Amino acid sequence: MEKEKILDLFKSTEALQHGHFRLTSGLHSPEYFQCARVLQYPSYNEILCGEIALHFRDMRVEVVVAPAIGGIMVGQEVARQLCVRGIFAEREDKTMILRRGFEVKAGERVLVCEDVVTTGGSVQEVVDLVKARGGIVVGVASIVDRSREPVDFGAKFFPLLKMEVPVYQPEACPLCMENIPIVKPGSRKVADPAKL
Ligand code: ZN
């Protein structure tokens, strides 16, 4: 799937927005990305995850494991298309664990799926969890790779789209210098940058 087509889907669903945003990290950015906004449309999720399923169809995947919460929709749809089990790991007391009777058996071939890889921390925890149970991680996939540092999961990593999003310290933000009103993602309110 062409990068432009993926970006068109992100823009038309407002998963990707342009403007002046104050991110939860406190940094400012001219872009805001919320993957769930595109994945809320099952037909788009089907298209995007279809690319992942196609990519790994000959890898004899037996179970897809996703880190909760963001990875669940991706993992479930990829699993559906590969006709295998789809399970998720969740955090309990800061540790990623399998609950609900979910299992990875020794020797099982596992594809780890995530929506957005930023630092890769959650994915790495799932990879470690799978390996600790004797599972074989045949690959890692995500809709978007936003990592700044190269990530190495010790398995083939297949992101559909590599997105490099510029971020600025508030005091060095060129959008602030131009007095462009800033938006806190998740709200429609426009605030005066000087008051944030
Ligand atoms: Zn700014």
Image (tube, rainbow, N blue to C red):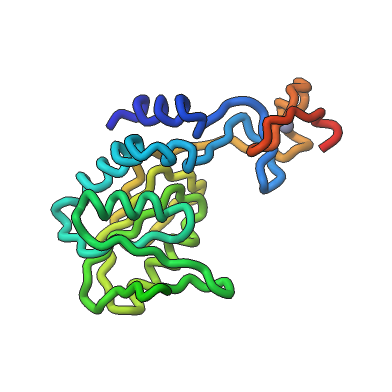
The picture quadrant where one finds residue 61 is bottom left
Q: Quadrant of the C terminus?
A: top right
Q: Quadrant of ligand 1?
A: top right
| Residue at point 49%, 61% (across, down) | 121
Tag count: 0
| Quadrant of res 41 | top left
Q: Looking at the figure, which quarter contains the N terminus?
A: top left
Residue toward you, 66 or 85: 85
Q: Is residue 55 left or right of residue 188?
A: left
| Point 35% across, 72% down: residue | 102
Nearer the observer, 36 or 192: 36
Note whether 128 is above or below 151 in the view shown. Answer: below
Residue 35 percent location from the top left of the image = 47, 41
Give the side of residue 29 with respect to residue 79, left or right.
right
Report the residue at 25% width, 52% height from top: 80
Residue found 54% across the figure and 73% down from its top: 92
Q: Position of residue 195 (x, y in %)?
A: 85, 34
Residue 32 is drawn in which quadrant? top right
Check the image and report above or below for 56 versus 40.
Answer: below
Residue 66 on image: x %, y %: 38, 60
Residue 64 at what x, y percent from top left?
29, 60
